[in-house]
Amino acid sequence: MNLAISNHPDSRPGSGNVPGHLMTVAAAARIIQSGRGVSIAGDEAALRQLPKGFWIGGTIPYFMSEDGGLCSRELVFVNELPAASGAPDLCTYDERSIEGVCNDAPDNGFTVLIVPAFSEVHQRFAKDAPEFDNMYLQPLVGWVAGIHLDDLSSDKVSPKVVFGPTGEFHDNLAVAMHVAIDGDKAAGIEIINLFQPGNGPVIRFPESGLSATEVDIDGVSTNLANYLHSSGADTRLPLVADYCGAYINVSFQNVNATTGEVTFYAPVYAGQAYRLAGAIPPYAEAFAQQVPHDDGEIAFCCNCILNYLYGELEGKKTDRMHGPITFGEIAYQLVNQTMVYLRVS
């Protein structure tokens, strides 16, 4: 399935640097009704109050705002398009058509992709995105929609995305906004990863995937769950690997000492060398040190729910980085415990 809506006549934004903002549903509705293309994050109940229009969205009630990290079921976060962008194309993708998301990207621009957590399209993207056609040719950013943590045990609430033109909510489709920008501009993805490999042993996986049992630890076949338990590893710290010069995290979802299985929020890849991350300074301070302090335009930003929880970011500011706090971040491929942002220069 691939539903596309193209070139809305009134979707070009006004001039100037217009960052995303946390706002009331009424304020977001006025922006939608103006015809400008936007992406929106918010609790499902809040998103259901918004009118149909030229927008995409995803469910999450956690945010980085001007006032610091917070949880709100009433407010929504609205990302308008950069001033240098043209009218975007909006699309939906299922677990089969998602492999073509990069084929739909503009020649010069970027794509914002929102994927519902725990869905088949989420699993497909997590495992196979690095092999998709034309991956890495144009910036692909985005996030994994989630729910309030108190609702995780409920079978009545699920992460969803919204396709604004129809007003439909989906828990099994991804939504995307493909945005062309002016020829004299360029979009680029940046990440802020606070973690680096620690001094522990090298861990290699025999198979790629989102779970593991037996692994190679410094050349010895070992059950990973038993190793983590016996070594007293802090699983709030992720596994870290060097992917072509960039440190990429794989966060732990669950360690089951009974079954010996470990599950992850992002895939591990066979043969890749991983180490448990070393300790870091306080999160808020560490983010503040790495946020760019020039006047370049930040067109999009998101951060990980694990950073929010483990770093106790509620009420703490992350400089000028504002956006949803998510169940996964997209910087071409799925990443974890990472702040992702898009710059247009």
Image (cartoon, rainbow, N blue to C red):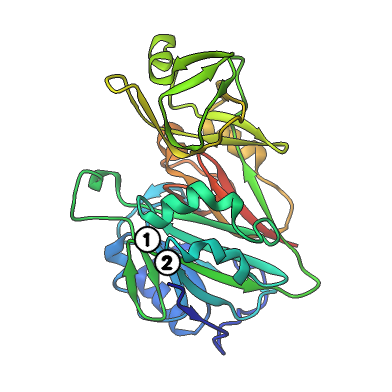
Residue 210, given in percent of the width and then of the height, sits at 44, 38
Determine contact: label 2, label 1, CB under 8 Å: yes
**First-in-chain label (2 vs 1):** 1
Going 33% across and 66% down the picture, which residue do you hit? 170
Residue 148, given in percent of the width and then of the height, sits at 30, 49
**Taking 244 as reference, is 104 above or below it?**
below
Q: Is residue 63 visible?
A: no
Residue 9, given in percent of the width and then of the height, sits at 57, 90
Q: Between tags 2 and 1, which lies in front?
A: 2
Disc sitting over residue 57 in the figure: 2
Q: What amino acid type is highlighted by mark number 2? A: Gly
Q: Is residue 156 visible?
A: yes
Q: Secondary structure at mark 1?
A: strand
Mark 1 Cα shell of 10 Å, populated few (<14), some (14-19), many (≥20): many
Q: Residue furthest top?
A: 230
Q: Quadrant of residue 252?
A: top left
Disc sitting over residue 42 in the figure: 1
Q: Secondary structure at mark 2?
A: strand
Q: Taking 43 as reference, is 1 left or right?
A: right
